[in-house]
Image: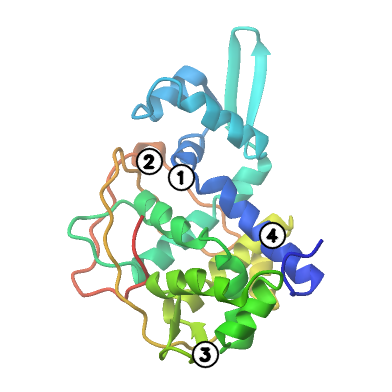
Amino acid sequence: MAITALPPETEADIARVTEALAMITPRWNVRILLALSGPPLRYSELAAKVSWLQNGQLHPKLKSLCDAGLVERTEHTARHVTYGHTERATALLPVLPMIVTWAEKHLEKADRPLPAIEQIEDSLTLLTRRHAAAILWVLKSREEVSARVLARIVMPSSDSTNIYPPLRQLVADGLADTKGNGRPYRLSAAGDALAPVLGTLSAWSAGQPLDQAAHHPVWGQPQAKGKPRPWVSSQSRPAPAALPPARAVGSPPAWHHRDLFSHAAGRPTAAIPAGGPRR
C-alpha cells in the first residue's frame, strides 16, 4: 500500500534511502563500522577499539549491524569468532567522507576542532528526521512547492496540517527555506548540496555502482539555492574518531586505524555557511 502520492518507483527509492540511513544513524554504529574497516577482529579486539561503550552495549550493536547486512560474524571454531565488514558495508564506506565534505561546508563553525565522526553523526541526525527524505525529494524535483501541495504528495492520507511540523523542522535545520507564512518552500543551499550524498545512498541501496549517483533523475540534477540558516551547536561526545579527506564517488576510502580515534584538524577560521541544529 502506497504511503505517499509519489510514483511507486520514487516511493521505493525514498524508502531504500531512508532504510540505508536508519542502518547507520543509531548511536555508535558508524564508529563500530570504522573500527572494523581493517582486517576482521575478535570481539575483545573490537571492544578495545570502542572502549567507551559500557558492558553489554557492544553485543546488541553488533547484532543489529549483522542483521542489517553490514557486519559479518565468522565462527572459525567455538572459541574463535571474528567480526568484519560485508561487501555491502565496504561499498557504503565512501559515502562517509562525502558526508564530512558536506558538513565542513554547511555545519556551524564550532568553538573547538570537531572530529569528522561528529560531523557525520550530526549530519545523519538531520537526514533521518521523519518525512525528511520524501520532502527533500519533492522540493528538489519541483523547486518550489506550497505546504498544501507537499501535504498531498508526502502524506496524502493525513490531515494537511500535519506537514507543518516536519517542514518547520527542515527549515530550522537549514535544509529548506520559505519567504514567510503561506509562501512556497524550497531547498536551501545546504539542502541542495546534499544531492551527492542522497544520490550515492540511493545508488548503494539499489546495489548500483556509486558513480551512478551522478545520473540519478533527481539528485543528479544541480540546482542553485538561497542563503542557508544558522546552526545551534550540540554537546560534545566522547572518544571522537577522524576520517580522511573525502574522495571521489566510486573511489574506496583509505581508512587508517591509527587515525580512527584521533581528533580531526580544526575548521577554517572564517564563518561557515549554516545548515541546522547539531544533535
Residue at 48% x, 69% y: name it.
Answer: 165
**Which of pointers 1 and 4 lies earlier in the amino acid sequence?**
4
How far apart, in angstroms, are the residues tagged by discs 2 and 1? Answer: 8 Å
Q: Relative to residue 65, is residue 229 drawn left or right?
A: left
Which residue is denoted by mark 3 in the rendering?
A: 184
Which residue is denoted by mark 1 in the rendering?
A: 255
Mark 2 neighbour class, 10 Å CA radius: few under 14, some 14 to 19, many 20 or more = many
In front: mark 3 or mark 4? 3
Percent x, y of residue 223: 54, 86
**Which of pointers 3 and 2 lies earlier in the amino acid sequence?**
3
How far apart, in angstroms, are the residues tagged by discs 1 and 3? Answer: 43 Å
How far apart, in angstroms, are the residues tagged by discs 1 and 4? Answer: 29 Å
How far apart, in angstroms, are the residues tagged by discs 3 and 2? Answer: 43 Å
The quadrant the C terminus occupies is bottom left
Residue 222 in view (yes/no): no
Mark 1 neighbour class, 10 Å CA radius: few under 14, some 14 to 19, many 20 or more = some
Instruction: Tell whether label 2 touches label 3 (CB within 8 Å).
Output: no
The quadrant the N terminus occupies is bottom right
In front: mark 3 or mark 2? 3
How far apart, in angstroms, are the residues tagged by discs 4 and 2? Answer: 31 Å
Which residue is denoted by mark 4 in the rendering?
A: 15
**Which of pointers 4 and 2 lies earlier in the amino acid sequence?**
4
